[in-house]
Image: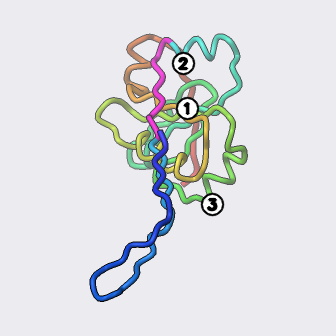
Amino acid sequence: MFYLFSSFLLTAPLGVTVELAEIHHQHVKKAEVSATELKSWYDQNKVMTVIDARSVKYYNGTVLPNAIWLPSESTEQDISAKLPSKNDLIVVYCWGLKCPASGWLFDKLISMGYTNVHEYHEGLEDWLKHGYATQTLKIRN
């Protein structure tokens, strides 16, 4: 949904003229993906980048298959280096429903112009409950 306010002149008392600039506001609905849908994307070999958004404090090395680790507090420079194409399918997740990291990273990616971002909000905890495969990804501190 887009909101657009056209430029116009507003005349205030005492002859003061104020020009309001054109404002564009884009409201982005968060695209979410469920465990079963994400699993089917894996089974279809869908080309995507899956991102574990947990901070180093909560990262334990267990990730979804082929996931990369990109903490939600990463800089825009770090994000751009790991995700050069803004149109590729990206799925972000963290531990589970009480973990805000995937939402924070989702918002940051959208603000940077990434266009095909999905959040798996239920996260790794839900993935494990389904019994789906994981892998170990060691990081350097």
> Where 90 falls versus 85 (above or below)?
above
Q: Which amino acid is tagged 3?
A: Gln
Closer to the chain start, of discs 1 and 3, is 3
Identify residue for label 2: 38
Badges 2 and 1: C-beta atoms under 8 Å apart? yes
Residue at 64% across, 33% down: 49
Helix, strand or loop under label 2? helix
Residue 105 seen from this side: no
- 57 or 78: which is nearer to us? 78
Residue kind at label 2, given as amino acid type: Leu
* Comes first in the chain, label 2 or label 1: 2
In whole angstroms, how far apart are the C-alphas of marks 2 and 1?
9 Å
10 in relation to 65, above or below: below
**Tag 1: amino acid:** Val
Neighbours of disc 2 within 10 Å: few (<14), some (14-19), many (20+): some
Q: Residue 18: image x %, image y %?
A: 40, 78
Secondary structure at numbered mark 3: helix
**Quadrant housing the C terminus:** bottom right
Of 94 and 113, the residue lying toward us: 113
- Disc 1: which residue: 91
Marks 1/3: CA distance? 19 Å
Magenta residues span: 28-36
- The quarter holding residue 41 reads top right
Is residue 137 something that shows in the picture?
yes
Q: In the rendered structure, does residue 29 fall within the stretch colored magenta?
A: yes
Ranked by sequence position, the earlier of labels 2 and 3 is: 2
Residue 42 screen position, x and y as percent = 63, 16
- Residue 42 included in the magenta stretch of the image: no
Q: What residue sits right under mark 3 in the picture?
A: 77
For label 1, the crowd category at 10 Å Cα-Cα, with few meaning under 14, some 14 to 19 and many 20 or more, is many
Q: CA distance from mark 2 to mark 3?
A: 28 Å
